[in-house]
Amino acid sequence: MYDHRTRPARRAISPASASYHATVLREAGLLTTRRNGMSVQHDLTALGSALLDGQLTL
């Protein structure tokens, strides 16, 4: 079974599109972003995880 919390999504989208979507999700409080040199890591917040797990509805 696919576990969204441990497996990164692999999709063919442009870096600009990925950046835009990450910004929208970050502004909504659904993920955080950490930069380390040239690398960027995105992690779900508790709110993002709760939404994906079906514990909250919009």
Image (tube, rainbow, N blue to C red):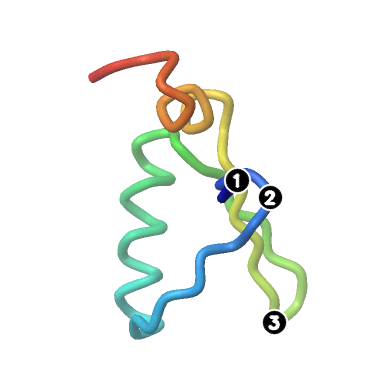
Q: Residues within 10 Å of mark 2 (few under 14, many from 20)?
A: few
Question: For the residue labelled by badge 3, is the local secondary structure a helix, a strand or a loop?
Answer: loop
> Which residue is denoted by mark 2 in the rendering?
6
Please give the name of the residue rendered at 45% of the width and 36% of the height, measured from the top-left corner.
30
Q: Which of the pair 26/46 is nearer the observer?
A: 46
Q: Nearer the viewer, mark 3 or mark 2?
A: 2
* Mark 3 and mark 2 residues within 8 Å of each other at the beta carbon: no
Question: For the residue labelled by badge 2, is the local secondary structure a helix, a strand or a loop?
Answer: loop
Residue 15 falls in image quadrant: bottom left
> Which residue is denoted by mark 1 in the rendering?
3
**Label 3 to label 1: alpha-carbon separation:** 27 Å
In the image, residue 18 above or below residue 28:
below
Place of residue 39 in the rendered image (x, y in percent of width and height, measured from the top left): 69, 75
User: Is 50 on the left-hand or right-hand side of 35?
Assistant: left
Q: Which of the pair 30/35 is nearer the observer?
A: 30
User: Is 33 on the left-hand or right-hand side of 39?
Assistant: left
Q: Quadrant of the C terminus?
A: top left
Q: Residues within 10 Å of mark 3 (few under 14, many from 20)?
A: few
Could you tell me the amino acid type at mark 3?
Answer: Met
> Which residue is denoted by mark 3 in the rendering?
38
Place of residue 49 in the rendered image (x, y in percent of width and height, measured from the top left): 53, 30
* Mark 3 and mark 1 residues within 8 Å of each other at the beta carbon: no
* Mark 2 and mark 1 residues within 8 Å of each other at the beta carbon: yes
**Label 3 to label 2: alpha-carbon separation:** 22 Å
Please give the name of the residue rendered at 51% of the width and 64% of the height, measured from the top-left corner.
9
